[in-house]
Amino acid sequence: MFFLLSKIFWFFVQPLNLAIFLLAAGLFRWRKLMAAGAAGAFLVLAVATWTSFGQALLYPLEERFSRPNPAPEKLDGIVVLGGGLEGSINLARGGYEVNAGGDRYIETAVLARRYPQAHIVVSGGAGTLLLDGEGDGATAPRLLTALGVDPARLILENQSRNMFENALFTKRLVTPQPGETWLLVTSAFHMPRSMALFRKADFAVLPWPVDYRTSGREGLFFADNAIDSLQATTLGIREWIGLFAYWLSGRIDEPFPS
């Protein structure tokens, strides 16, 4: 139920859809409602596309966790969370097309070479509500094998639909033992919620953030790339809502883990 409600809620509140719904209010013949809807849609789109508001939302998320320094000398396993592959395209074409989060798999291949004895866990099923797609847990072996990772090292968790299930199902699958060292690889803006969920699942992992979307030098100025700005705003709003929703539902212990 939580998965379904989260998908429905996000459909209505993501910036672009919200602007469309506000504009749709103008179809009514009430002048005040029409004016309010148009003004609200303009404000949402202007902030989301013309400013660096999205980067301002992402920056504190990306800075919350850093990689361990120095890096571990010995590693028992690496967990990479799904979200970096184009599930619907890969299901149709049988390849391993990556999206903006594909850094997760590139970095995992680098780490696999650095730690040749470590297990590689790919956690991610098909998290779509309407479209058919191949889960990252099913696609990733093709990509990682092509990048030189021995398929015998791979452990695949391809049932999870969100980050809560990532942590829960991965813990059940690998049953980490006391004293083992595991890395968690995911996008930097995902790391606070991911770390909180793995802590809640009693799976001790070290953060290894990748896929940074900010430089740390952004201010609230006019942006020169509307598409990038809209994407950053969408990601930032979604992640902050996710943190508070997971906290309020008891899935994590604090709203902004550190």
Image: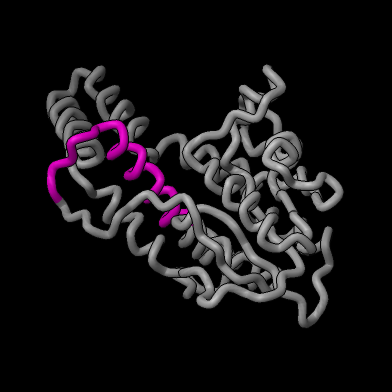
Q: Quadrant of residue 13?
A: top left
Looking at the image, which residue is at 34% across and 44% down?
232
* Nearer to us in this view, 148 or 211: 148
Q: Report whether 186 appears left or right of 256.
A: right
Which color scheme does this rendered protein use? Answer: one colour
Looking at the image, which residue is at 57% across and 43% down?
5
* Nearer to us in this view, 73 or 211: 73
| Percent of width and height locating residue 27 | 25, 17
Q: Quadrant of residue 140?
A: top right
| Residue 85 covered by magenta stretch | no
The residue range painted magenta reads 221-242
| Percent of width and height locating residue 224 | 18, 36
| Percent of width and height locating residue 119 | 78, 59
Q: Is residue 169 visible?
A: yes
Q: Report whether 88 appears left or right of 61.
A: right
Tally of marks: 0
Looking at the image, which residue is at 62% across and 34% down?
128
